[in-house]
Image (cartoon, grey):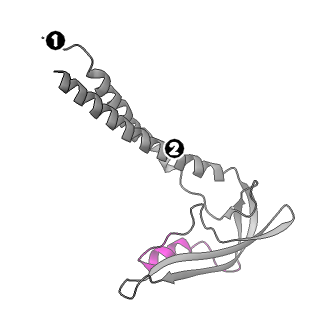
């Protein structure tokens, strides 16, 4: 009987811990995406908009990523950035994915960028999605469920 309760407590706490870890990761993703929305919107000019490729090994297919460089002025100073999003450009096996990321940007275009006022050298052209914040309820179910199993293991059972 005691072994069953210990097993349920350990199982419940493990499940709650995994849920808490994923909740924390999703919360960080949401907060990071939200933070860039408070940055200063500034006019920018696209200097480079092309597809970059790399090949890690002779027998490995090429990877592709969008390459974007843009200039902007902030507090009277000129800057150059190459960050499409806060996390940088993603490499993909299909060239089409990199092309899709560049659909909104052509060399010479006047666009808006968002500049980190605390670090003006950091600017982006696109915000990350806040979807993690809207889905955070799912790992919270594991936290609640795991704690419920752990607490339930101590309830008196009827004979």
Find disc 2 in the rendering and name its residue.
27
Q: Where is residue 86 in the image (x, y as percent from the top left)?
A: 60, 60
Assign a secondary structure to mark 2: helix
- Hey, which quadrant is residue 23 in on the image? top left
- Considering the image in quadrants, where does the N terminus appear? top left
> Where is residue 89 drawn, in percent x and y?
55, 69
Q: Which residue lies furthest to the left in this view?
A: 159
Mark 1 or 2: the one toward you: 1
Q: Is residue 132 magenta?
A: no
Whole-percent x and y of residue 19? 38, 39
Label disc, if present, on residue 158 of the rendered structure: 1
Q: Give the range drawn in magenta.
A: 90-108
Residue for point 45% across, 77% down: 96
Crowding around mark 2 (Cα neighbors within 10 Å: few <14, some 14 to 19, many 20+) is some
Decide: is 52 above or below 116: below
Q: Which of 115 and 59 is in front in this view?
A: 59
């Amino acid at each position: 009987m005691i072994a069953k309760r210990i097993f349920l407590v350990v199982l419940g706490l493990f499940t709650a811990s995994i849920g808490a870890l994923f909740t924390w990761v999703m919360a960080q993703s949401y907060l990071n995406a939200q933070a860039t929305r408070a940055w200063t919107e500034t006019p920018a000019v696209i200097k480079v908009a092309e597809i970059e490729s790399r090949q890690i090994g002779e027998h490995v297919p090429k990877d592709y990523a969008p390459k974007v460089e843009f200039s902007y002025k902030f507090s009277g100073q000129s800057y150059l950035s190459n960050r499409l999003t806060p996390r940088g450009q993603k490499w993909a096996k299909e060239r089409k994915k990199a092309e899709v990321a560049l659909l909104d940007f052509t060399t010479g275009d006047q666009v808006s960028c968002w500049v980190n006022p605390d670090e003006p050298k950091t600017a982006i052209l696109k915000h990350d999605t806040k979807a993690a914040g809207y889905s955070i309820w799912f790992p919270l179910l594991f936290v609640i469920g795991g704690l419920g199993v752990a607490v339930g293991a101590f309830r008196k059972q009827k004979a």
